Image (tube, grey):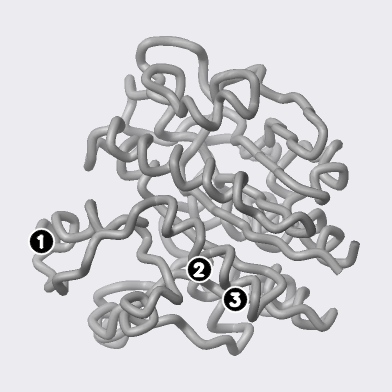
Amino acid sequence: MGAVVLVFLDGVGLGEPDSWNPLFLPGLPRLSARIGSPLVRGCARENGDFLCRELDATLGVPGLPQSATGQTALFTGLNAPALIGAHRTGYPSSELVRLLKDHSLFARAQAEGFRPTFANAYSDFYWELVARGRLRPSVTTWMNRLAGLPFRTFVDLVDGRALLWDITHTFAPDWARRHGRPFPDLPPVAPEEAALRLLRLLEEADLVLFESFLPDLVGHRHVPPEPVLEVLDRLLDALIADRPPGATVVVTSDHGNIEDLRTRLHTTNPVPLLVAGPGARIFQNAASLLDLTPGILETLRA
């Protein structure tokens, strides 16, 4: 039986090697060295147990790919935008929630006897805002909830059993202040420590999911690219370097954004799929968002 750490980065596309693409310059030097290329168009290649693929995020539906439908497609293997007739932004509608209920990666993994877990920590204040209708749950939040799995808390975060969406506690305090929300005083977490936290969760789970929307914030101009890229580069490099021999690390996204700073909108660019470990061979022919969930399940079975 395989084990998988899945890192979902919202808003990472594969753009052109130009000055407006921060994934080209300054780029992700550690990750690029592993790929043998910057994380741009044309990076698809295979090197032993390391694989880079380009995944179509448009799924044959006109318009710009969006989070709600893109993530539903990614985490179910179903063409969500085609099924509802359009790309849908933001949070999942009732139609998308119904797809997640029976077809999500977590639900299907559980049905086969695997143990999924969501590594992200949620604050009590987040749940208060959801209860008051001030926030709506994301696709991954719904996936975890519908699978009946517990959510990690800020107690888990402090104890080293969870991660915050911003990884290091560097970006979240300012983001919370700008939205008029309280934020506790948390000790910083180095990206390398964050990677070890995710890998340690494999002691209690077969499938570990972590989500960060930092790249999407860069693309929408809420944070500068350089510090975000440094954190992501160090996190992913440490995950790949320190993964146990039998484990597979998978990194992907739902739509383009960060790779073209000429626009604040999403893009139609393909998104990357990076796979390190024994599961790399399973994803050799992956071509779109729809191939992630079947590939993860096959990797777990291997």
Q: Which of marks 2 and 1 is in front?
A: 1
Q: Which amino acid does label 3 sit on?
A: Thr
Visible residue check, residue 78:
no
First in sequence: mark 2 vs mark 1: 2
Callout 2 secondary element? loop
> What is the distance, in whole Å, between disc 3 and disc 2 at their CAs?
23 Å
Residue beneath the point at 65% across and 76% down:
203
Q: What residue type is labelled 1?
A: Arg
Indicate the position of residue 182 as horizontal and vertical percent values.
12, 73
Callout 1: few (<14), some (14-19), or many (20+) C-alpha neighbours within 10 Å?
Answer: few
Residue beneath the point at 77% across and 36% down:
287
| Rendered image quadrant of residue 262 | top left
Number of residue marks: 3
The residue wearing badge 2 is 93
Q: Which of marks 3 and 2 is in front?
A: 3
The residue wearing badge 1 is 177
Residue beneath the point at 22% across and 66% down:
187
Q: What residue type is labelled 2?
A: Ser
Q: Nearer the viewer, mark 1 or mark 3?
A: 3
First in sequence: mark 3 vs mark 2: 2
First in sequence: mark 1 vs mark 3: 3
